[in-house]
Image: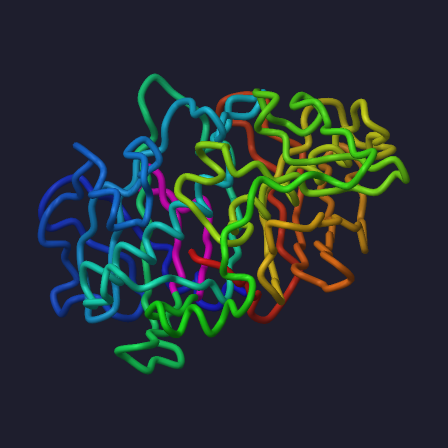
Amino acid sequence: MFRSSDQRTDDHGIQGTGTRVGTGGGEPANGLVPRPLDYLQPVPRHMVHRAAVAEVFVTDSIRTGEDRFLVAAQWPRDHALYSPSSSGISDPLLLAETVRQSLVYLAHRFYGVPLTHRFVGSGTAFRITRPELLRIGDTPLPVVLDVQWEWVGNRPPRRYGMRLAVVLTIGGEVCGEGEISAVAVNDRTYRGLRGAGAAPADTPSPAIGTTRLPSSSVGRLRTKDSVLGLGADGSWQLLVDLRHAIYFDHPSDHVPLMVMLEGFRQLGHLLANGDAGGATRDAGAPDGEIALTGMSVDCRAFGELDAPISLVVSERQPCEGSAASGTLTIEAVQNGTLLATCLSTWASSPSLPGEPAVGGELTASGAAVVHGPA
């Protein structure tokens, strides 16, 4: 999934004009960044397709080559949804959302993709390699994404195809990577992709007998942030609430990507850590929290808002031993149709500042596919 990160792991410092970037392809001829990155304020919210300013994490970007960029983002010390773990590590899904925002922002700012186009994802994945560097401190966390842009199946002006591969650095040290692919299409093309499912629906009701799990069971703080339900037959369901101000930051005619990722993450947390609601902690797992370290998602269809979505565990490699690391594969199914498959990786969370982290490795290869606006 991550094809060239080994070429882009040099110094990514940002302290002052003339800072040297990494050695991957696409640097300017002199290999220098023209100015420092700025963290003073978020970029305009419409440039990342967000309605709330508080949900914008990207603050600046610098073009360092024809299709190469550095993107600055500020991650909050705390967040209503993306809250830090019990060991004080930033939520890894902040990386997934920052990569998504970077794709949209660079497309509009540097490549002239119209603001009215809709972004439909065709691949996403991320991996945290050094979670101890994501530890919450006394100030919000400034991060840098070293971005390589690639055009894929590009047919403007009605369809722009693009892919981002990124390396995450904090304080000049590499600690993660990710990628996302998407197409940006005009309204007419989008309506053709959506067909009859394009009309917004009222807030759907879960299947009869489904109980929403407590937020503490799924690693969230607020009751309304739990998207995981347990059916009367013991099945897991993704619960959707159109009134949720973060999951549905703006109106959508389908289940957003980040809601799907939350469902996969919350079921994984429940199964890895064990809690009320029918889950048992992995036998042999060490004491302390088992945390998400990576995801690779492959979606086949849009998730509609008017029917229940089941989450089915298809494969599981439990976390075992003192250096626990395990994987979990979950499928999302709606009306008998496979919507998405997610391979997630889990590992014991570092408990002390500076302690070596147990990094998980994504084991899937090839491109993941995620359908839905990015």
Name the residue at the top extreme: 138
**For residue 306, side relative to residue 36 (left or right):** right
The correct choice, above or below, for 146 with respect to 153 in the image is above
**For residue 61, side relative to residue 314 (left or right):** left
Q: Residue at x 90, y 40 (%)?
A: 233
Quadrant occupied by the N terminus? bottom right
Q: Residue at x 31, y 45 (%)?
A: 144
The chief SS type of the magenta part is strand
Q: Residue at x 18, y 63 (%)?
A: 110
Q: Position of residue 176 (x, y in %)?
A: 46, 48
Judge by depth and name the residue closer to the eye, 63 or 172: 63
| Residue 155 found in image quarter | bottom left
**For residue 65, side relative to residue 317 (left or right):** left
The correct choice, above or below, for 335 with respect to 357 in the image is below
Residue 175 covered by magenta stretch: yes
Q: Position of residue 35 (x, y in %)?
A: 10, 48
The correct choice, above or below, for 298 with respect to 315 in the image is below
Q: What span is colored magenta in the figure?
A: 164-181
Q: Position of residue 135 (x, y in %)?
A: 45, 27
Q: Position of residue 90 (x, y in %)?
A: 47, 30
Residue 242 covered by magenta stretch: no
**For residue 62, side relative to residue 325 (left or right):** left
The correct choice, above or below, for 88 with respect to 301 in the image is above
| Residue 251 found in image quarter | top left
Judge by depth and name the residue closer to the eye, 55 or 9: 55
Q: Residue at x 40, y 69 (%)?
A: 183
Judge by depth and name the residue closer to the eye, 161 or 316: 161
**Colouring scheme, one of rainbow, by chain, secondary structure, one colour:** rainbow
